[in-house]
Image (spheres, rainbow, N blue to C red):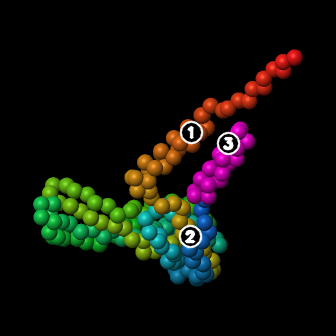
Amino acid sequence: MARKRSQYLRKVILSLCALVSVSAANAATVVGKVKPEFGSISVNGPAAGGPGVYLFHFELSRPGTGYFTILAQQTFNLFDASDGSWFGGDDVPYEPIWFFNTPTTSASVLFKLPRPYVNEYSGIIEKGFFTGTGSMLAFDFVGDRKVEYSISAQFLAAIPEPASWVMMIAGMFGVAGVLRAPRARKYRMPRTI
């Protein structure tokens, strides 16, 4: 019985690891070589595909200072809460920026592209979503030698819906219950003469 339980737990743990693991198929990379103009470069990189958490990483062939930004857009529409009539909307940039003031050749940043949302306030309903449009690296260098660069975006995890959180928590309690369940013991009857 104990052996079956350990085999079962091993399968559960391996399944959870498979769900959490990062797949290289979810990565996009832009590689190139550019000569700085007046000591500066500005190159475009991959975009975040859809709602979720992404790991962006860049590498440079020589140290420089500058910034890295992820380009995204928020689209929203406004509706009257009483009758549902549309009365406005817009597209606005959603662009977090990371500054590198110390010379660097590589860095990684985590970025979360939010899922679609609905908010209600003061009789107005706002419905919106976010779209990844790219990334950009702008760096300054000493001298005009060519710089090789690599920018990658790797999808790490989707953002779970609230119902998914409930199911995951219930599953964790289920695994904990299996681990805490009493084990059956084998007793041998004493031999009688």
The mark closer to the camera, 1 or 2, is 1
Does 166 appear above or below 181?
below
Residue at 42% from the left image edge and 75% from the top image edge:
133
Residue at 48% from the left image edge and 49% from the top image edge:
168
Structural crowding at the residue carrying mark 1, measured as other residues with C-alpha within 10 Å and reported as few (<14), some (14–19) or many (≥20): few
Residue at 49% from the left image edge and 67% from the top image edge:
68
The location of residue 91, given as percent across then percent down, is 29, 72
Residue 5: numbered disc: 3
User: Which residue ends up furthest to the right in the rendered image?
Assistant: 193
Magenta segment boundaries in residue numbering: 1-20
Does 184 appear above or below 46?
above
* Quadrant of residue 77 within the rendered picture: bottom left
The location of residue 29, given as percent across then percent down, is 58, 75
Nearer the observer, 97 or 9: 9
* Quadrant of residue 161 within the rendered picture: bottom left
Does dot 2 land on a helix, a strand or a loop? Answer: helix
User: What residue does disc 2 label?
Assistant: 26
**What's under tag 2, amino acid-wise?**
Asn
Structural crowding at the residue carrying mark 2, measured as other residues with C-alpha within 10 Å and reported as few (<14), some (14–19) or many (≥20): few
User: What residue does disc 1 label?
Assistant: 176
Query: Where's the N terminus, which quadrant?
Result: top right
Does dot 1 land on a helix, a strand or a loop? Answer: helix
Q: Are marks 2 and 3 in contact (CB under 8 Å)?
A: no
For marks 2 and 3, the one nearer the N-term is 3
